[in-house]
Amino acid sequence: MLKQMILIFLLIFVSGCTGNIVFESEELILEGPFVVTYVVDGDTLDLDNGDRIRFSGINTPETGECYYQEAKDRLKELTLDKEVYLEQDTSDTGKYGRKLRYIYLNEDEMVNEILVMEGFAKVYDKYSYDTKRYMQLKRAEADAIIDSLGVWSCEDLKEGCLYVGSKNSDKYYPPDCKYAKKIKAENLVCYMSEEEVVGLVAGSC
């Protein structure tokens, strides 16, 4: 955790154009402050400089999934209309062009880590090779898993399903399809065999 880090050779640079401060050390480089103007969901927000930021290293529930609204509300509570600082990850942007960043309230409080620690987010293991703070986030995640906090208390309604669909649609999808993840829990239909989807339309992912 950042509290355990020893920050050496701290340098403070003030940008004459933006008035933003960059804190630089051997361990941590933070740029800001920026004000959060809008929270898109549990892991994406907008800043007063026009940038849309995707939290690096973590993933929160999508619309319709268990703990989606709770994660979004917690991020609002932590950041909306407040000043934050940014740390760039190994890659600057993601596949949708959003900047990938670790968000800090101050030198010691990383919002990415807070969301994981409190069970509002999971560590994005798929991109571990490209996540600078991966091990730090995994340590934070361990206790949340043990204590079944937040997303770790959610029942996986798709477990054991060969396909899933919505009771409001004639399409069906593999459980890990991005469209399957958007189906609301109350509308989810679980198909356990090929016979159950005869006559339905296979959705594309």
Image (cartoon, rainbow, N blue to C red):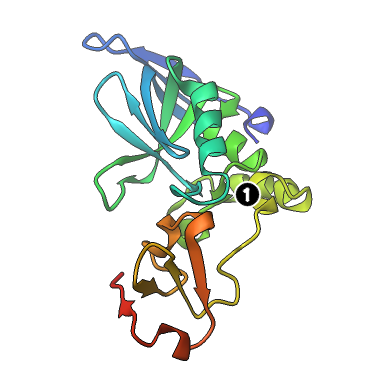
Above or below: residue 166 compared with residue 146: below
Q: Residue 193: horizontal and vertical position, in percent?
A: 50, 87
Residue with the most extreme bottom position: 195
Above or below: residue 185 compared with residue 70: below
Provide the secondary structure element on which disc 1 rests: helix
Residue with the most extreme left position: 17
62 displayed left or right of 47: right
Say which quarter of the image contains residue 171: bottom left
The one nearer the camera, 201 or 205, is 201
Which residue is pictured at 45% across the width and 15% down the height? 82
The one nearer the camera, 195 or 159, is 195
90 displayed left or right of 142: left
The answer, for residue 69, to whether it is visible in the render is yes
The one nearer the camera, 205 or 30, is 205
The one nearer the camera, 40 or 89, is 40
Question: Which residue does the numbered mark 1 point to in the structure image?
Answer: 151
Which residue is pictured at 41% across the width and 28% down the height? 86
Which residue is pictured at 65% across the width and 59% down the height? 155
The answer, for residue 105, to whether it is visible in the render is no
Q: Residue 142: horizontal and vertical position, in percent?
A: 71, 51
Q: Amino acid at mark 1?
A: Val
